[in-house]
Image (cartoon, grey):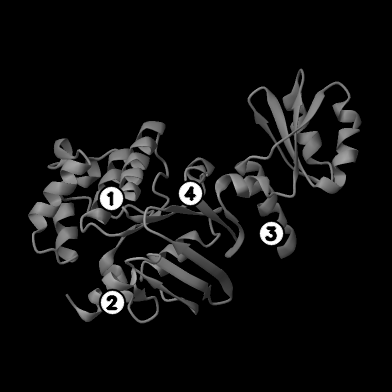
Amino acid sequence: MSTAEARSAGSTEQGPLLQVENLAKRYRSRRALEGLSLTVRSGEIVGLVGANGSGKTTSLRILAGLLAPDAGRGSVLGFDLLRDAREIRRHTGYMSQRFSLYAGISVRENLRFRAEVFGLQEPRGAVAAVVERFDLRSFETLTAERLSGGWARLVQLAAALVHAPRLVLLDEPTAGLDAAARQAVWRHLARLAAGGAAIVLSSHDLVDASRCARISCLAQGRVVRSGSPSDVALATRATVLAIRGGRVLGLIEPLQAVPGVIASYPSGDCLRVVIDPAVEAGIGGCTLLADFVVERVSPTLEDAALEWSASRRAVSR
């Protein structure tokens, strides 16, 4: 075992597998990330949540040792984030959002190549184990270009895990997947966490966000909320109303034009309206709602996301 590997094994035995503070990154004049602090322990699934361009991918690439931060510090699996990027790349499992398989070679060859890149002493055995774990036997000889979207994501996940990493970093792991394929991915993530791995995933999908133990919500490169999904939802300052009645969907556009209304959208048999609490009394007495039933309801994670996104847009103007 190398000195760096020994340092990693010893320093993460009891403490967090990942701990970073005040990470920042700029691309010329554009701020991609500012002030990200994150701690993740063995067995945790933590989400970085936000819209496209919010800083999620930049964060993961820094944590994976693929991109150097402009500021900040931390450790990943006991390795120094700034000095030991090469070791971090060797010991973490990173799956990018983009298709990262070689399209013209088979699933087995893709996995074998990845095992050799990680320098495994018995790549054939590692590939056989991951094929069994992900039930890929029927697809081993298919070229990657022939896989469906769901199976391609599972093979990418298998490739990221072929070296059995203790820290797994996943960029939009369920993007574009149907419900069954999404469930398959989450079953594998749950099994990994139960086995002691730490998982950090990025997503703009609030269904995925709700399945994480903790989330950090990013907007324009900054963390605007953090905590459990339920705590983040309840911490929103917005008021949420449920409106019911005949032809309720016709209210969407008129309400959206009312000052203080952040969003209005259909939800089952009602219309949900997210509003600035300062105008709640005025909205409740609005003549538009005279023939409808209006009820104040608890905010969801989606309501919170709409409120924090609106807040960040207002600040940036």
SS class of the residue under badge 4? loop
Q: Is residue 284 left or right of residue 176?
A: right
**Residue designated by label 4:** 213
Q: Is residue 101 visible?
A: no
Q: CA distance from mark 4 to mark 2?
A: 28 Å
Q: Which mark is residue 124?
A: none
Q: Which residue is mark 3?
A: 312
Between the C-alphas of marks 4 and 3, the distance is: 25 Å
The mark that comes first in sequence, 4 or 3, is 4
Task: Give the mark nearer the N terminus: 2 vs 1.
Answer: 2
x, y percent for residue 52: 53, 54
Q: Please tell me whether mark 2 or mark 3 is closer to you in this view.
A: 2
What is the CA distance from the residue labelled 4 to the residue labelled 1? 24 Å
Coordinates of residue 46 in the picture (x, y in percent): 46, 54
Q: Residue at x 81, y 41 (%)?
A: 257
The residue carrying mark 2 is: 7
Earlier along the polypeptide chain: callout 4 or callout 1? 1
Q: Are marks 3 and 1 in contact (CB under 8 Å)?
A: no
Q: Earlier in the sequence, mark 4 or mark 2?
A: 2
Residue at which label 1 appears:
156
Closer to the camera in the image, 157 or 239: 239
Identified by mark 1, the residue type is Gln
Q: Residues within 10 Å of mark 1 (few under 14, many from 20)?
A: many
Q: Residues within 10 Å of mark 2 (few under 14, many from 20)?
A: some
Q: Would you say 225 lies left or right of 140 here?
A: right
Q: Nearer the viewer, residue 9 or 176?
A: 9
Q: Residue at x 18, y 48 (%)?
A: 130
